[in-house]
Image (tube, rainbow, N blue to C red):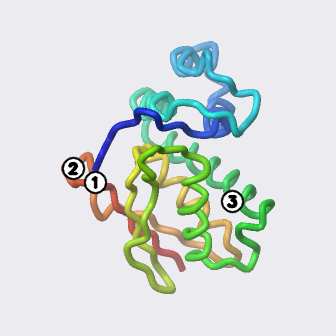
Amino acid sequence: MDHSTEGVTVFSGYVTDLLEHYQDIATTTGKELFAMASGLDLSNPTNKVPMSVFNAMCQWIVDNLGPANIRQTGMLIGTRLYQHMLENKIVNTDSTPLDILKAFQKASLQTVQDPRGRGWAIIDHDDKFCCLRKTQTYHPILQEGLIKSLIQQVSGIEIVRVQYLKSIAAGDEFDEYKVSWS
């Protein structure tokens, strides 16, 4: 996989969501996190900011606050993304988990601008699971929470599991996730 973030941007709304979640530590332990966002134009959620900065902020959270915190941030971003998809009629309240993951695949190409066209690929699925391959440099732990949150929005879905099938951190070429629900 090409791990370059050169020329890759993400909507600033993701940075805003991340910072809002950690507002209570902005003047104490989170000063460094908030400093990373200085100079970014966060005035409009669709402004473009460097993916490298967003990923660095996610990694700071993992390193300083633990992976559970970035998963929770992913959950919040997933809720926001789901609401955006509902408002723009990309999904509706009758959408299945697979419908939502297909919409997520398309939405990620809109919210992340990558000259190489990287994003997500659905590699297998049935009525109770979907396997996804991440071909972009999205922070892998944040994505666990985001994906889980998207599926939990579906009416009647109580249990959602996101597990790694493959991991770049473990030497694999791509991160791959199996998302299952019941």
Disc on res. 2: none
Tell me the quarter of the image containing the C terminus: bottom right
Judged from the image, the secondary structure of the residue bearing numbered disc 3 is helix
Judged from the image, the secondary structure of the residue bearing numbered disc 1 is loop
- Amino acid at circle 3: Tyr
- x 62%, y 34%: residue: 48
* Local crowd size for mark 3, using a 10 Å CA cut-off: few (<14), some (14–19), many (≥20): many
Quarter location, residue 138: top left
Judging depth in this view, the residue of 167 and 162 nearest the camera is: 167
Who comes first in sequence, dot 3 or dot 1? 3
Position of residue 154 in the picture relative to residue 177 (left or right): right
Who comes first in sequence, dot 2 or dot 3? 3
Q: Mark 1 points at which residue?
A: 167
Judged from the image, the secondary structure of the residue bearing numbered disc 2 is helix
* Local crowd size for mark 1, using a 10 Å CA cut-off: few (<14), some (14–19), many (≥20): some
CA gap between label 2 and label 1 equals 5 Å
- Amino acid at circle 2: Ala
Tag 2 near tag 1, CB within 8 Å? yes
* Local crowd size for mark 2, using a 10 Å CA cut-off: few (<14), some (14–19), many (≥20): few
Tally of numbered discs: 3
CA gap between label 3 and label 1 equals 26 Å
Disc on res. 170: 2
Position of residue 126 in the picture relative to residue 22 (left or right): left
Q: Position of residue 151 (x, y in %)?
A: 59, 68
Q: Position of residue 61 (x, y in %)?
A: 47, 31
CA gap between label 2 and label 3 equals 30 Å
- Amino acid at circle 1: Ser
Disc on res. 82: 3
- x 41%, y 48%: residue: 116
